[in-house]
Amino acid sequence: MICPGCSAANREERRFCKSCGARLKAGCSRCGFENEVDSAYCGGCGVKFAGPANAAVNAAPRTQSQPPGTVRAAAENRISEQDMAELLESRKKVSAAPRKEGAGPFGQDDIDALFSS
């Protein structure tokens, strides 16, 4: 593979030029296929690249996107102030409950106390 930056010959499996360090291949943002940086279409999925601006997008490391709705779901799973207060109060009850000798930091009575409220 000939480097588009300095014209040095490189082995086909190289991603960066051995002489100047220029990127020789760019991963497709759609399928991850390693394309030459001057490719107009992806060799893996056939998507048309937008042009010179696309080289910067495709040269960036491929990241795994989050499933749709992940951010919204995370926001919906936040604990309200009232729920937090109730959880802290339950913790106080468990901490204040008498423990059996040798039962360790938490015993079955502690666990039962959490669910008896």
Image (tube, helix red, strand yellow):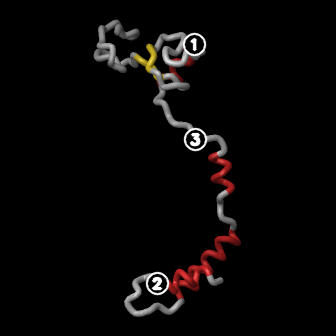
Q: Position of residue 39 (x, y in %)?
A: 50, 11
Residue 66 has which mark? 3
Quadrant location of the N terminus in the rendered image:
top left
Amino acid, disc 1:
Gly
Please tell me which of labels 3 and 1 falls first in the chain. 1
Residue 51 has which mark? 1
Instruction: From the viewer's perspective, tell me whether residue 102 is left or right of residue 27.
Output: left
Q: Position of residue 78 (x, y in %)?
A: 65, 60
- Residue 46 against residue 74 in the figure, above or below: above
Cα gap from disc 1 to disc 2, whole angstroms = 65 Å
Q: Residue at x 53, y 90 (%)?
A: 97
Q: Position of residue 36 (x, y in %)?
A: 44, 13
Residue, disc 2? 107
Element marked by disc 2:
loop
Amino acid, disc 2:
Gly
Callout in the foreground (1, 2): 2
Please tell me which of labels 2 and 3 falls first in the chain. 3
